Image (spheres, rainbow, N blue to C red):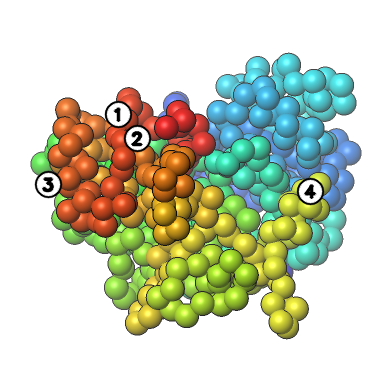
Amino acid sequence: MNLPDLLRIPLHQTPDKCALEFAAADGVRRWTYAELHRQAASLASWLLGQGLARGDRVMIMAANSDHFVVACLAVWQTGAILVPVNTRYRKSELAHIVGDCQPALILADSTCTHHLADIAGIKRNRIPVHGLEPDSVPHESADPPPLSGDDTCALLYTSGTTGRCKGAMLSHNNMVATVTGLLAAWAWRPDDVLLLTLPLFHIHGLQVGLTCALAAGATVLLHSSFDAEATIGELSQAHASLFFGVPTMYYRLIRALEAMSPTEFPRMRLFCSGSGPLAAEDHRTFERLTGHVILERYGMTETGMNFSNPLAGPRIPGSVGLPLPGVSARVVDADDRPVPPGTEGWLLVRGSNVFKGYWNNPEATAAAFVPDAYGHLWFRTGDMAVLDPDSRYLTLLGRGHELIICGGINVYPREIEEILIAHDGVREAAVVGRGDPEWGQVPVAFLVADRPVDTGSLIDHCRSHLASFKAPRACHFVDELPRNALGKLQKFALPKP
């Protein structure tokens, strides 16, 4: 099944149901399923009239809006490849993506067009740039081309937390596999209402949020951006039943809730967190303040969703739970041999959700997969992990390239960061390795504090909870930690310790 066919199921079942509400500056704009798909079909006809062909790339650079949603549906209907890009990207980043994917045309809102004006590839190749509401969109829809489940439907550029971003090719089959798996795992219902403040240029907002909701026949309350106080207000008004966020958003929600009188969320049934590790302390604090236990899950741009804590069952702070339907996982050693539960190693995954490869990068694609004895290809996530011997829940230990080897012993930064954050006054922590002539590497911490914190007491605090060699050798206090647009920590941008 291709993605447009999946998304048309609610259209045929409940055409007059509200599919989307967008909180625009001039008021709320509401779309039924019939209206949304009708407008998408018209835009698809316009795109085809511009000469767009199956397999062409359409780059979208825009803030969240109902027109962004229409554009996504339209591009998928044409058989072209959707390339959403981060609205915070500037000239060098945009030039890299444009040069790599060679879009046939670009759709951009008024806040982003000036960032595209000086890109040499756009000028040289005469790539047309249009608004999200092009002029002369026909009212009649043309017949879309036939689509295959193996066709690439989205080219999502990795967040670049380790360097230059790569384009991950997701097929219709990949997207459908993740969406149908999540519909089952989280028991999506047509009466669900998702409050969506995540950016649609990212897989979290686009696939886990928007596409799942529209495939379920649910309603999306779309906002252009996240604001903690506004989110709390909307959730407390009994409108939404689902909210998805990243750890930074939950941190801000907690700070806002602590400054308010007790607040209830009467219709909420599920809070999810992903796109980065949620501090165990924040997990517990949110439950204390709201009575809701956050469900942590784990996914990647290249794979969609892989793991989730159960909807009905224990949700363990710091764990990402069990493999989602259709996903297989194994933890292996440095020679790609499976290790027993309880043993730390590298996480590999396989399934229909796993991407086709990196655009124009066969070398990176080949390096990303490893075959097993039966010829099955497993994707190297790059994450270190351990499976609990009893529950079989997975705990992520951090990115493999962030591993600190101190005196021949593996030290995982996340373990130290959790202890640092638990210290009174420490708001955020990032631990990295520093070269040491005796130990090879030693841990060093970068911290954001709410108030002055004594370094000696902080290191003593770590030594009281961890082996002494895991205690930071130095603590550097900074105003903020470098993060990308979705709040994911970018350790490579920290000062050299």
Q: Mark 4 or mark 1: which is in front?
A: 1
Dots 2, 1 in contact, CB < 8 A: yes
Q: Mark 3 or mark 1: which is in front?
A: 1
Q: Label 1 sits on what residue type? A: Phe
Numbered tag placed on residue 361 in the rendering? 4
User: Which of the marked residues, 4 or 1, is nearer the chain's N terminus?
Assistant: 4
Q: Label 4 sits on what residue type? A: Asn
Real-space Cα separation, disc 3 to disc 4, in angstroms: 52 Å
Front position in the image: 58 or 447? 447
Estimate the x, y position of residue 209 in percent, counting from the top left: 49, 53
Front position in the image: 394 or 106? 394
Label 1 belongs to which residue? 477
Residue 8, quarter of picture = bottom right
Q: Mark 4 or mark 2: which is in front?
A: 2
Q: Residue at x 23, y 38 (%)?
A: 426
Q: Label 2 sits on what residue type? A: Phe
User: Which of the marked residues, 3 or 2, is nearer the chain's N terminus?
Assistant: 3
Estimate the x, y position of residue 124 in percent, counting from the top left: 87, 21
Q: Is residue 462 above or below residue 473?
A: below
Q: Is residue 463 above or below residue 478?
A: below
